[in-house]
Amino acid sequence: MNTNKKSLEFCVIGCGRLGISLAVFLSKQGFIPKAFSSKSRESAQRALGFAGKGKVYETAVDAVKTCDLIFITTPDTLIEPVCEQIAAQGGFNSASMVYHLSGALSSSILVAAKQKGASTGSIHPLQAFAPYEKGQKSPFKGINMSIEGNDAAIELGKEIVNALKANSFTIPTHAKTMYHASAVVASNYLVTLEHFALELLKEANLSEENAYEILEPLIMGTLNNIKTQGSINALTGPVARGDDEIVSRHLLDIDKKLPQFSSLYRLLGKHTLDIAADRGEISDDARKKLAALF
Ligand SMILES: NC(=O)c1ccc[n+]([C@@H]2O[C@H](COP(=O)([O-])OP(=O)(O)OC[C@H]3O[C@@H](n4cnc5c(N)ncnc54)[C@H](OP(=O)(O)O)[C@@H]3O)[C@@H](O)[C@H]2O)c1
């Protein structure tokens, strides 16, 4: 690590789930917690207790003035106004390295710090953080974290991610929204999709617990196929085989018994047909019949 002593000292503004975990696991790796500030003194005090070093400050600007490396870990909607307030009160200078950890927002919301000469970046852990519990395992270890920002923020960001024993990758600032949309589809919408599958299996007379157990090897096997063969080659099933009769039977049953899922089945089918057509393995006739059903 080529980080110098000064840039190892850091402060956390917003001592919630991520702010506290970040402080705890960075301090275990030799980074030095200098200052904590939060909406409530109790949260900042809790962060200090867990991190073991540093000081609690009533105002964000006083905390920020103690060091160059600054993490603003407030809720997303407050990052920009908090940054603006610190900047207006003279908290940033050209040595400041200011980060937030939002997945949806880019470093461009830290413009107030940038205007004071600071380097700005965002570091996003692809992980769900629960409130920190004393002695817990690191939620950062082995996960993937995106970094974007100016060159200096990216360089130090890589060292921060490396210290957390996570893997870093960089994305352009303008691509942050699309990156976050991808994470939402990969995680949240996967839940929606599996919920849909479980509802269909419950309608086939299986209990909720049994339904998941029955589908689990299929789900895991499919994820493994995506990993080893890619998403286009991983596709199997009636659409990939061009079997419009089976699909038509699904639709008759779903339209009759679970009509709230009819449009979702059709929309997913339409996009699945695009993947099958890309592979070029189904006939034109089958493609047309399936397209008409969807
Ligand atoms: N949690 C996750 O799974 C996760 C994952 C990836 C990224 N992130 C990102 O991490 C950031 C923080 O999320 P979180 O889940 O840690 O949120 P959180 O648990 O709600 O914590 C936010 C903290 O900000 C503090 N705060 C609120 N207003 C403030 C203000 N005006 N000034 C200073 N502090 C203020 C709150 O203070 P008090 O406690 O004092 O009221 C709270 O402790 C967000 O950008 C989020 O997108 C979160």
Image (spheres, rainbow, N blue to C red):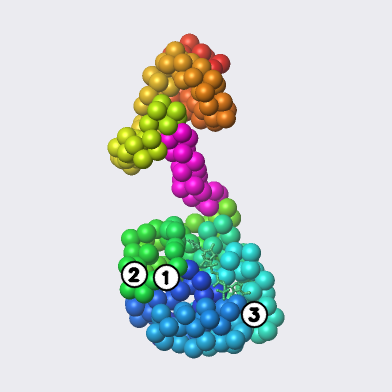
Percent x, y of residue 17: 48, 68
Front residue of this view, candidates 215 and 144: 215
Q: Which numbered disc, 3 or 1, marks the residue closer to the eye?
A: 1
Other residues around mark 1 within 10 Å, as few (<14) / some (14–19) / many (≥20)? many
Task: Tell me the amino acid under the disc marked 3.
Answer: Ile
Give the numbered dot on residue 136: 2
Q: Does the residue labelled 1 lie within 8 Å of ligand 1?
A: no
Identify the residue shown where x is 40% and y is 61%.
Answer: 168
Task: Establish if 127 lies above or below 188.
Answer: below
Please state, as top left, top right, bottom left or bottom right, where the N terminus lies in the image. Answer: bottom left
Ligand 1 falls in quadrant: bottom right
Identify the residue shown where x is 46% and y is 48%.
Answer: 187
Give the numbered dot on residue 86: 3
Task: Establish if 48 lies above or below 19.
Answer: below
Badge 2 element: loop
Task: Give the number of marks.
Answer: 3
Front residue of this view, candidates 7 and 22: 22
- In the image, the segment drawn in magenta is 178-199
Task: Tell me the amino acid under the disc marked 1.
Answer: Tyr
Visible in this render: residue 129?
yes
Identify the residue shown where x is 29% and y is 37%.
Answer: 217
Residue 63: quadrant of the picture: bottom right
- Circle 1 residue: 132
Q: Do the residues labelled 2 and 1 touch (CB within 8 Å)?
A: yes
Spatial CA span between label 2 and label 1? 7 Å
Answer whether residue 187 is magenta in the image. Answer: yes
Q: Which of marks 3 and 1 is nearer the N terminus?
A: 3
Residue 294: quadrant of the picture: top right
Answer whether residue 270 is magenta in the image. Answer: no
